[in-house]
Amino acid sequence: MRIQYKQPYWIKFEWDIQEYPDDQYVTKFNKFVNNEFISFLYGKEFAITSTFKIEKSFVKDKISMIYGKPGKAMGLSYNSMTQCLAFEFWLTVNEVDEFRYFHMKGVSADDVENGVTITIIRDGDMLIAYKNFVEINRIQLDGKFIQDYKIPELFLGCASPQSYEKKHRYHCEVEYELFSIITNVTEIEEIRSIHNLKNEKLITQNCYKDILCLYDFKTINNLGIVYDESKNMNFLEMVPSEFVL
């Protein structure tokens, strides 16, 4: 699915579709802010996996976020000038906020333009990066994630769409094939097996209960809402225009 420039999507709500179990062509859902999108970042074990591409012709800021959180931005960034992909974040170290740049080693501009799978795993105090499920780098966490990230929104296609600083919005046009967040899992082979399975076989996996969200972008309703293939109802929707500058 193509996310257009300045038309980001967000993961924020848990949706109630009990009244519409067999009908995806509806005009209104009940939905509630899901604070799990806050708490998972502060846990000791999680994995974020994204399969995406940003073609040369796609519209993008000089630095853009494939996915991210606002404030002092956290997320997977692409610098089109240096052609570098990185996971950027801020830590509080001895009561001082410090920036960290986690380079995705061995990921080329061709990878980004043709399609690549990037997984970021937190295993205790270590972040480990994988390209196409092969380890490419790791970094020690010498502090705690800053308090800015204690908001539920996680954006695809930007980081801070409401920022008054234009350069901090990090918009990009990006084509997604898959995005997932899994908690309590650190084994890359387990994550790989989940992404290689057909949706109907996901429930057979031991860590199925730990899949916070999983989108293969194949089931989208008439409102453009992307269905969650996990056991949850954490659907993905376009950010309302009033929240995008």
Image (tube, rainbow, N blue to C red):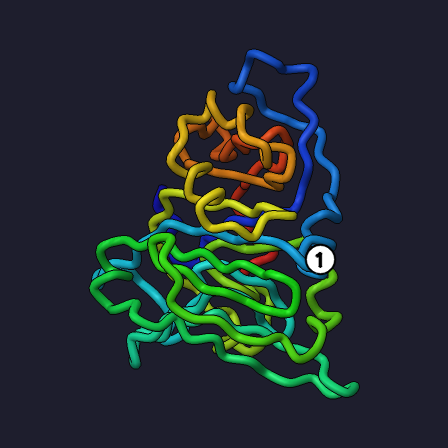
Depicted 112 relative to depicted 12: above or below = below
Depicted 119 relative to depicted 26: above or below = below
Q: Is residue 123 left or right of 43 when viewed as pictured?
A: left
Q: How many marks?
A: 1
Q: Which residue is mark 1?
A: 43
- The quadrant in which the N terminus is found is top left
- Front residue of 225/203: it is 203
Secondary structure of the residue carrying tag 1 is: loop
Q: Quarter of the image holding residue 134?
A: bottom left
Residue type for callout 1: Gly
The picture places residue 122, in percent across and down from the top left corner, at 59, 61
> In percent of the image, x 63 and y 31: which residue is there?
233
- Spot the residue most to the top: 22
> In percent of the image, x 51 and y 49: which residue is there?
9
> In percent of the image, x 54 and y 55: which residue is there?
155
- Front residue of 134/85: it is 134
Depicted 67 relative to depicted 137: above or below = above
The picture places residue 77, in percent across and down from the top left corner, at 44, 69
